[in-house]
Structure formats: C-alpha cells, structure tokens
Image (cartoon, rainbow, N blue to C red):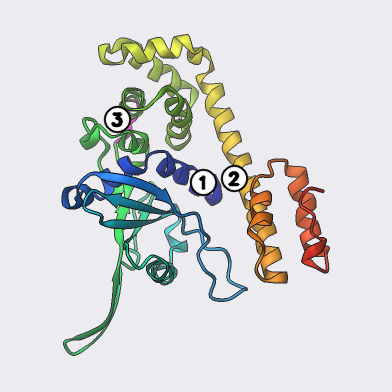
Amino acid sequence: MSKQTHDHNFKNLFLDFPKESLAWFFPYAQKNWGKIHQVEFIRQEPKKHKLSDKSLALDIPILFSFKNHQLLLWLVEFQEDKSKFSIYKLLRYTIDLMESHPQAMVLPTVLFTDRTKWRKDVFRKLETKINDRIFLHFEYLFIKLFDFKAQDYYNVNNPVVKILLPKMGYEKSERIEVIRQAYKGLFQLASSMLFDKYIDFIDIYAHINQEEQNNLYQEITQHKDTAMLAQYIRDRGMQEGMQQGMQQGMQQGMQQGMRLTARENIIEILELRFGKVKPDIIDKINHIEDPEKLKKLHRKAIQIKKLDGFNVSC
C-alpha cells in the first residue's frame, strides 16, 4: 500500500473519531481541562518556506475547546516509513501553527504505524544549550503502535483502540483472536455505518487470507459475546463475501491513494510554476474523482503558459 493511501486511511480514522483518539493517546487533556465542548479541523496546508519544497504530509491539526476554555491544537503526523520522518519539518510546522493560533497549546504528535522492530531510533527531541541556558528545546508525543501489546487492550472500550489492534504487537498464534477482538469491539462501540467503513481498515492492515477468514468466521459464530456480530454478518451477506470485500477494499484504497497523489501532483506543479494557487481551484481539483480527467489536468498543468489558462472543468 502506498504511503499516500496509508496516510489517507489514518486521517479518516482521526477525523471520524477525534475525541476517542485524543482520549487514548493523550488522556491528560480531559483530566486537566474538563469536558470537550467543540472540535474543529484545521484544514490548511503547512506553509512552505521555499516554493520548491514538496507539500508537507503533516496533517492533521485538530483544535479542541475544553470546559475551562483551554484550547488544544493537536497536530498529528502519521508515519509508516520512519526513514521519511523529519523532526525539523515537524518543528517548522509546529511553529507555524503556534504563530497562527497563539491562544492554543500546540501538541505535536507522531504516530509510527509500521509493524517492525527498529534497529535505529528516530530523533525524539532537539535542544540547543550553553551552560545552564537553554536556547531551544523541542520534543513531541512519540507513539509507536507496534510497541503496544494487543492483548492488553482487549477490554479498553475505545473504537480507535479496537480498529488499531492489528497494528499492535502480538504472537502469530494470537492473530485470529486479535482480529476477532477488533471486529467485536468495533461492532459494539461504533455505528453500523462506521463499522462497515472500518472493518475494511482492519482487514487491510491485518492482511487476512482466505483460510484466516474462514477461521475468523468460525470463531465469531462459536463465541457468545460475538453472537450479534455473527448475525449481523449473516444479515449483510458478509459470510460468503468477506474475502471478496477485503480484496475490493484494498483495491478501492489503492485507487483512492492514486487519485490523492494525482491531485497533489497537479497542485504542486501549479504552485511551482505560478506561485500561490487560488483556494477555489485547489478545492475543485480535490473533488475530481475521474482518473482520466486528473491525467489530462496533470498534462495541462505542465503545458499551460499562464494560470488563467488552467480550466479545471475541461
């Protein structure tokens, strides 16, 4: 799966479950500041320091307003490939958000999602210090899902935790039970619409094969605590189509990622050639689903001599 698709899936997860995500990864927020009153998604591209800079994949900023009027701007970056992580880019983006939202406390967070053991760690902080005087200190909330043990979270009533169980650490012998717990928890804690949406997420990141699908369904039907889930699967015709649905979900995810990459490439070409691009043009590009149209627009972005000649609706 491409990095773009991966990022897009995780962004959707946090957009659908912002409060639940914050409650798990940063539980101190509500303990210190009370109930969340409002959630706002800051949909803005990180400011470039050079026009030649690539678009920073450092979404998403979420602004939380709490009972005692505290504002928390939670900046979340998702990283499947730790070699592409840059603490310097994260620092620049954090400073930009601090400047644009001076009333909010900015919490930079990096969620590393690869299921591998690391030989070398990433930079956790930056510091410039002379004698006892500190001129710069920067660190972020570091989260590596593979360091979490899946079985420790079977009884945690949080849909985000259940969805991410397959990305945590577990033995091969636990595989089916981990996926069953993910299905069960998501079914109990999320709406039918979100269950249907994120069951694909679980399947994709668990890399379920046909044999495991069969074993999984047997596990679900044999346990009393998943009887309602088994009935739901039967009612939706999922028993016979689970493997097909997984494959379709992966294909759709890959196609979605390709469209996302194509849109980003078009916008980047326009910015490199003509500078700032009007928000309405960017919005129109981001709503195009037809791959052929995106392909034509990509060529046009390279060929046109003036930005006025770029017609998105063509």
Instruction: Inspect the image, locate mark 2, and give the three-letter code of the amino acid beneath it.
Output: Gly
- Is residue 235 shown above or below 126? above
Estimate the x, y position of residue 253 in percent, counting from the top left: 57, 38
Return the mark for residue 257.
2
**Looking at the image, is mark 3 or mark 1 earlier in the sequence?**
1
The kind of secondary structure element at disc 1 is helix
Q: Residue at x 42, y 59 (%)?
A: 82
Label 3, label 2: how many angstroms apart (C-alpha)?
30 Å
The magenta-colored residue range is 171-176
Q: Secondary structure at mark 2?
A: helix
Give the answer, above or below, for where 292 lies relative to 232. below
Q: What residue does disc 1 label?
A: 8
Q: Residues within 10 Å of mark 1 (few under 14, many from 20)?
A: some
Q: Is residue 53 left or right of residue 272?
A: left
The three-letter amino acid code for the residue at tag 1 is: His
Separation of marks 1 and 2 at Cα, in angstroms = 7 Å
Residue hosting label 3: 174
Mark 3 or 1, closer to the camera: 1
Q: Position of residue 98 (x, y in %)?
A: 37, 68
The residue type indicated by label 3 comes to Glu
Give x and y (percent) for residue 218. 37, 13
Q: Alpha-carbon distance for marks 3 and 1?
A: 28 Å
> Residue 22: x percent and y percent?
30, 47
Residue at 50% x, 20% y: name it. Answer: 242
